[in-house]
Amino acid sequence: MSIPVPGADCTVDELMVVTLAREFTNDTRAFNGAVSFIPVCAYLLARRTHAPDLVWAASSIAVDADPDRLAESTLSDAIWTGASMLSNSPFDFWAYAQGARYNTFAFRGAQMDRYGNVNNTVIGPYDDPKVRLPGGGGMADLGGMIPNVYLWSTTHNDRTFVEQLDFRSGLGWGDGGDHRRELGFSGGPQLCVTNLCVMDFHPESRAMRLRSVHPGVTAADVQDATGFGVLLPDDGSVPDTALPTETELRILRDEVDPTSMRLREFV
Amino acid sequence: MDKVRSLEDAAAIVNDGATIGVGGLSMNGAPMAFVRELIRREARDLTVVAIVSSMAVDWLVAAGCVRKVVTGLVSFEGFGLAPNFRRAAQAGDIEVEEYSEHLLICRLQAAAYRLPFVPTKAGIGTDVLDLHPDTTRLERDSATGELYVACTPLPLDVGIVHAHEADRLGNVRVNPKLIWMDSDIVRAAAATIVTVERMADHATFVAAPEHTTYPRFTVDAVVEVPWGAYPTSLFPEYSHDAGFYQAYLAATREPEQWSHFWKSRVGAPETQGEFLEANGGAETILSIRQGT
């Protein structure tokens, strides 16, 4: 389901992809896990626009893949076309991940907290779950190992953005402040892009802070939809999220994801 | 020694209550024909180690074969949550021992290397370690002061993986050599069963030994099963069957439909040929077949 952005010639999924893509550079060395349509689109878009040297390993396997369309799964061999190398996990992938040769990872969770930690394991108690979710997969590994972590959510509401996770499957800034560094990890979550807004993280407390709101959304709307207090920028003003250019939209729509697999994240 | 077995004979290696490792990654390369054979022989009380799984775990759980799932992730990805896994976990019918991908790899490597533990930074700062502090111990290195996780061995009674080709001696070729976490399952298993798309002459292994993936001394049984990963994929020969995933999920939403679907599409067909026929036969095969 695509949701139009008021007053703009684009949809929310496109705005999210473009916002993320603009964060990536020629130094970005990324890979992806399951159900990661938005970041996969963003890596491919960045590579086709301002960051031609960006590295993306499709499914964490197919280095420099260049598919002509995406598939129902972001762990599917259908998106490995054009790769210059097929990694095998234990050697090629994990050594580069734990050594932070790969430096960029994006994840989402059924729940996220103010410090960018995520839950994809259970809603309710672990031993008696109300909802059993797929599990963290590589989140518990990569949230810590990879220095540039990006979060996204297509369901910005107070069930997703919660005061307290039911289970911490993936590490963001931990308990905030210096906690992540004390655990032995560098970097941390950089940005959280949602269907309502873009949030960064306060440089000291590491709590989520509103950076921009999508057109038609107010800071109050974001706060209402968030289960914890969202920080505002120091000067108190929250700009609108910058809109995609025509070129970005054309490349995303025609070349990166012509069959709109990214909409599978908006159910 | 001739390692070639029938599916029935190979499945008899798996005793009720065994700990088995099931290969594949999500919708790719899972030994589905073997999983179906376990279902048909009504295997029970299995502990299933599947690092990142989709249909394999969901089938075994649906059939009541499983006591415990040891996993990092069980999901149908863009199609949705794994329905039987989810329902059974919520009802308390199965135990789920969750790890992360790399914690499980390290536990399998510790078993393969016969080490007391393999260290990693995986899982630090998450709740995953607290689920099983005996097998993933958070420790601090006395020399450097750095935190690490000591992952204890996870030995498997039987490892089951799917591959492209084998010879009768049990040499196996995954071609191209893309083995995800399957190699860790093979190395950690007391017995390994490999299902393959086709048998190949031993001479072809001698002619290109650099392409051999698993040597014969690690393989206990080889079973020839064409399309043996269906409905998951086998790169680069065939893709997963999106139609099967969709129909399966739709059927789980309608209790009356489900038992018919399960029986006619999964449980009842006796041979692999009948199973493929029940799922669209040649038309399905043409739709999932890749390349030449």
Image (cartoon, rainbow, N blue to C red):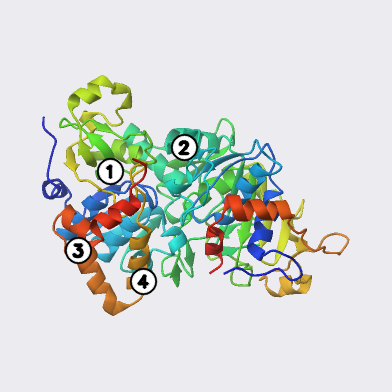
Mark 3: give few (<14), some (14-19) or many (20+) Cα within 10 Å. some
At label 1, which amino acid type do we have?
A: His
Give the mark, 3 or 2, whose residue is nearer the N terminus.
2
Which residue is pictured at 34% across the width and 32% down the height? B113
Mark 2: give few (<14), some (14-19) or many (20+) Cα within 10 Å. some
At label 4, which amino acid type do we have?
A: Ala
Residue beneath disc 2: B119
Whether residues under marks 2 and 4 lie with C-beta atoms below 8 angstroms apart, the answer is no
At label 3, which amino acid type do we have?
A: Gly
Q: Nearer the viewer, mark 3 or mark 2?
A: 3
Give the mark, 1 or 3, whose residue is nearer the N terminus.
1
Give the mark, 2 or 1, whose residue is nearer the N terminus.
2
Residue A176 image point, x, y percent: 68, 54
Q: What is the secondary structure assignment of the residue under circle 1?
A: strand
- Quadrant of the rendering where the C terminus of chain B is positioned: top left
Would residue A176 be seen by someone viewing this image from the given angle?
A: no
Residue beneath disc 3: B267
Residue beneath disc 1: B162
Residue B68 image point, x, y percent: 31, 58
Q: What's the mark number on residue B250? A: 4
Distance Cα–Cα, label 4 vs label 3 = 17 Å
